Amino acid sequence: QAVTTDDFFAAMSDANAGVDISRLKHWYAQAGTPTLKCARSYDAQKKTYALTFTQSLPSTPDDGGDAERKVAQLIPIALGLVAADGANLDMTKISCVVGDESGGAGSSAAVPDGSSDATTTVLRLNAMSATFTFAGNFDAEPTPSILRGFSAPVKLEVFPPLSNEELLHALAHDGDAFTRWEAAQTIAREIMCRVVADVASKEWSDPTVVDAAIAADAAFAPFVAAARGVLESAVADDGRVDRAWVEEALSFPGVGALVQRLKPIDPLLVHAVVKARSIS
């Protein structure tokens, strides 16, 4: 018997009794990959931490494809918070208040992720925008671990962007394999994009020019040190990392990942940076 999207939705409704998941259907009625923007804010006086999520959909050539006519989709955002000391905080002990909803207000919420992992909660974004404020008596701003387990197929943009230090902190301590992998890939991708811009006006056909630019990048040495720590953990088999994961996480992005970030694009230059001896 063929299974339809209506059957899938009915199964999800049964599994989430009492939860409004009606906007899940919009994923099947609207074309385009959503962009999820996250604005983060730490209030040192109140010791609170707030994340404002805003979703948007691109215009598409189909009927009803005008971006202005598209409505909010249910986006499950699996979230963890990593403290300055590297601890993944117990989200069951941190209260969350949802406010400032717009475009489908009234049903966004923070809910348990349904597993035994107390360090992850799921933010259910049911509006075009909503703010989730966490009252965890934060003595310092935590590092957010967003979209754990790749909980939603969206394009994530964080404001202000995570600094290199925050990304290195996530790489070293984040308890989720996906967001930890994403931290490693983001560091590597940003290094490579900077190198492309740096050597564009030089004789980059000489491999030593690209190698030198990579080694000179301020983020490269700290990244190498962090990667060394990950490798040592894998060799020691201390249970913190999976060896197969290490290979994926520490492999630098390919040409396809870079060209999405670069304009204009010089394919030969990008290929030269990808194939540089320093990172291959």
Image (spheres, rainbow, N blue to C red):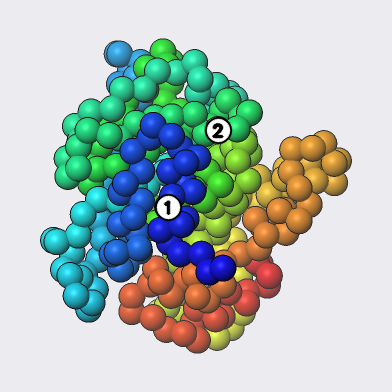
Residue 100's quadrant in the figure? top left
Expressed as whole percent of the image width and height from the top left, the position of residue 44 reads 33, 18
- Mark 1 residue crowding within 10 angstroms, few (<14) / some (14–19) / many (20+): some
Image check: 99 left or right of 14? left
Which quadrant is the N terminus positioned in? Answer: bottom right
Question: What residue is drawn where x is 19% and y is 75%?
Answer: 63
Q: Residue furthest front?
A: 1
Circle 1/circle 2 CB separation < 8 Å? no
Expressed as whole percent of the image width and height from the top left, the position of residue 256 reads 50, 75
Q: Residue furthest left?
A: 68
In whole angstroms, how far apart are the C-alphas of marks 1 and 2?
18 Å
Expressed as whole percent of the image width and height from the top left, the position of residue 241 reads 74, 43
Residue 20's quadrant in the figure? top left
Circle nearer the N terminus (1, 2): 1
Instruction: For residue 192, say whether it is visible.
Output: no
Residue type of the residue flagged with mark 2? Gly
Label number found at residue 114: 2
- Check disc 1 and report the residue beneath it: 9
Question: What residue is drawn where x is 49% and y is 15%?
Answer: 93
Instruction: For residue 6, say whether it is visible.
Output: yes
Q: Mark 1 against mark 2, which lies toward the viewer?
A: 1
Secondary structure type for disc 2: loop
Quick check: 196 above or below 19? below
Out of 256 and 75, give the one closest to the viewer.
75
